[in-house]
Image (cartoon, rainbow, N blue to C red):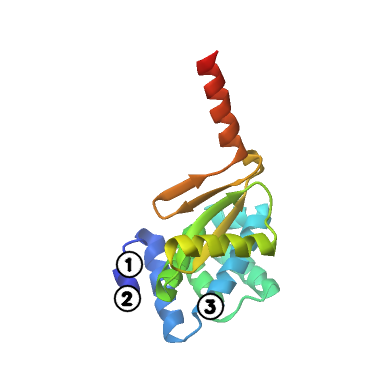
Amino acid sequence: MAAEDTSVSGVSGRYATALFELARDQKVVDEVKADLEKFEALLNESADLKRLVRSPVFAADAQSKALAAVLDKAGIAGISANFLKVLTANRRLFAVADVIRAYRVLVAKFKGETTADVTVAEALSDKNLDALKVALKSVTGKDVALNLKVDPAIIGGLVVKLGSRMVDGSLRTKLNSIKHAMKEAG
């Protein structure tokens, strides 16, 4: 099933597919997803970890030791930890963000979900997140997993990308529309 998925490709797609099939066979798909998301959160919070992951300057053994320490401290173990260690040993840790993204796509397809990329000006409350999921489910007919991104530059509102459709309800876009309309009128 996962190998037939055309939405994941390249190095990250192959690694994500292998991980997904292993996790599915061992019935730990959700646990692996949670571990990968925990690692992704650490990656987004730490400039030093980003540098460790992306820089080719670090030797494989130094990168491996540092990663092992990070995984131990974060409580990431089992298949997820072993997978991240394999990425490191194969000098592919730089692709971990793409692998996580591809793994999410495979999990969503496996569960019959769809994923929406949502950009907001500030973090949403649980109540607003639930309302957004319900609204998107009514449009798609499927459960919708959200990839949230906070971008204060949009000022307010939100931008939702669901498959090939995009709805830009950001205040920045609305202000730009008004600005262009005033230029044309004036």
In the image, residue 162 lies at what x, y percent?
45, 55
* Residue at disc 3, secondary structure: helix
Residue wearing tag 2: 1
Q: Is residue 108 above or below residue 77?
A: above
Residue 19 vs residue 138, the one in the foreground: 138
The label on residue 5 is 1
Q: Residue at point 68% right, 54% down?
A: 123
Q: Is residue 179 above or below residue 26?
A: above
Q: Could you tell me how far apart the alpha carbons at marks 1 and 3 are, in whole angstroms?
A: 19 Å
- The reply to whether callout 3 and callout 2 are in contact (CB within 8 Å) is no
- The reply to whether callout 1 and callout 3 are in contact (CB within 8 Å) is no
Residue at the top extreme?
186
For residue 153, side relative to residue 17 (left or right): right
Q: Quadrant of residue 14?
A: bottom left
Residue wearing tag 3: 30
The label on residue 42 is none
Query: Which residue type does callout 2 highlight?
Result: Met
- The reply to whether callout 2 and callout 1 are in contact (CB within 8 Å) is yes
Q: Is residue 58 above or below residue 156?
A: below
Query: Which residue type does callout 1 highlight?
Result: Asp
Image quadrant for the C terminus? top right
